[in-house]
Image (spheres, rainbow, N blue to C red):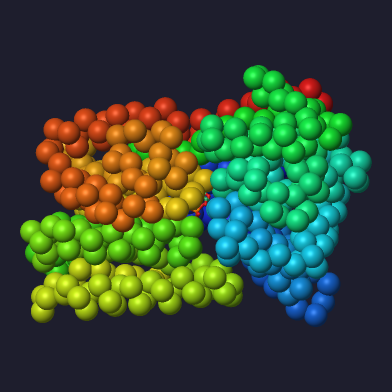
Amino acid sequence: MSRLIIVSNRVAPISEGGMAAGGLAVGVYDALKETGGMWFGWSGEIAGAAAPELKIEERGPVTFATVPLTRRDYDQYYRGFSNDTLWPTFHYRTDLTHYDRHEFEGYQRVNAWLAHQLLPLLEPDDVIWVHDYHLIPFAEALRQQGVTNRIGFFLHIPFPAAQLLVTVPPHDKLMRALCCYDLVGVQTAPDLRALRDYLEHEAGGTVSDDGTARAYGRTLRIGSYPIGIYPDELASLAEAGRDGRHLKNLRQTMRERRLIVSVDRLDYSKGLVERFRAFEKLLELSPNHRAQVSFIQIAPPTRADIQSYQQIRLQLESESGRINGRFAEMDWTPIRYLHRQFERAVLASLFREAHVGYVTPLRDGMNLVAKEYVAAQNPHDPGVLVLSRFAGAAQELDGALIVNPVDVTGMAEALDRALDMPRDERRERYQRMMETLRRNSVSVWRDSFLSDLRAVPQ
Ligand code: GDG
């Protein structure tokens, strides 16, 4: 089979055991090991004064090819247009969107430069799979340099409604570039409808029901490919860690209280403030839960050099302080807010320990934490997932209690119901969701995308 080339903004560091990184990295790395191939992208480093140089590292059948970015490239392409324009708009936060024409030029320049770096490493029948919003113009840049290989693109974040997308001033350029791919994959059916709507009504193209799209003089395929996890591996990890140091310490302080758990990068798209307020509402409306339930929020820092991320951090610190001040007892802290990263094994066993997985983003492409929480449960006595309808995962996980994160009282009611749910109902919901997770694992996601990409006529 032809060699696979993965291109993503960051090349994920894979540990020997393979499970240190998240679902995407592990799933993609497995495919690379099978067919042999290359993973190309930014090394995560900022280049000094010297010209940035390509670094190649072979590990078994996989070649890692990475480049550093200059400070200017990082500011314009990564921090600027990718994370201060595209990310907020694609997550329906046009109030936080900041647009600067120079940053967009930097975004295009870096995409072209990255494509140029990859060019000499390509072979004629390589299949190229590009990931996420940082790299929308990547295929166009390769095509301009004469590359005719099959190139696919997968968007990990939501595809916004056309009326939101057109608020990004260069939306037309972006979508023209997107149509240079042979296959464009999104997470869910609603994302696919939004993409189709743009192509048909803004770009004047056509899309047929088999996913063939014609726009801007090009023909491509579009489809939805919901990303998954390896549920059984996650279950083993959760089980193995259940008597680890962190869990033992936690149990001592919990003293039979019930536990609600959330884990997210500290991002305004994840709905953390609304979630804290809904927990407060639960304590207000149902005094029986006071001193009986604790909520742990793990939120490792991310993109801390962007102002909107600094603001959400301050807001959370203030909300957790306020709520704890209002309800805490000498021996009980309602919210434990931990602004740092934990090992994957610790998270898995924490999920297993928790009676409720509380996953309420305002918008999310998929949300792997929701899937990991379910997979980590004890099948005999599982916890309950409370899940936002605006996470892609809600399209699949119908055993969750589905909430609207804007409705703080509705979320408090869902928490109350989750905490009191009888074991039989919990088991039935868990089994249903676990079947879905096994059926739609990360290998199914990857294999179906790649087989559709390989089937595109070259
Ligand atoms: C994007 C899209 C889409 C979190 N904290 C720690 C940690 N994590 C792990 C989780 C999970 C991953 O990071 C986060 O994945 P999510 O899917 O929840 O969210 P994003 O980072 O926003 O990912 C999203 C995803 O891409 C894949 O397509 O689902 O919608 O936004 O695996 O467990 N891992 C460790 N320590 C932490 O403190 N080790």
Residue 238 located left or right of residue 269: left
Within the image, what quadrant is residue 337 found in? bottom left
Q: How many marks?
A: 0
Give above or below for 318 relative to 403: below
Q: Is residue 205 visible?
A: yes
- Residue 70 image position (x, y, % from top left): 76, 72
Q: Residue at x 60, y 32 (%)?
A: 193
Residue drawn at 19 percent across, 37 percent down:
426
| Image side of residue 95 versus residue 113, left or right | left
Q: In the image, residue 96 lies at what x, y percent?
A: 58, 65
Q: Quadrant of the N terminus?
A: top right
* Left/right of residue 60 with respect to residue 70 in the rendered view: left
Residue 367 vertical placement versus 305 (above, below) = above
Percent x, y of residue 279: 25, 60
- In the picture, measured across the screen, residue 241 lies left or right of residue 176, that is left
Look at the image and tell me in which quarter the C terminus lies.
top right
Q: Is residue 209 above or below residue 223?
A: above
Q: Nearer the viewer, residue 243 or 406?
A: 406
Nearest the eye: 30 or 95 = 95
Give percent across and percent down for residue 60: 62, 46
Quarter of the image for residue 216 reads top right
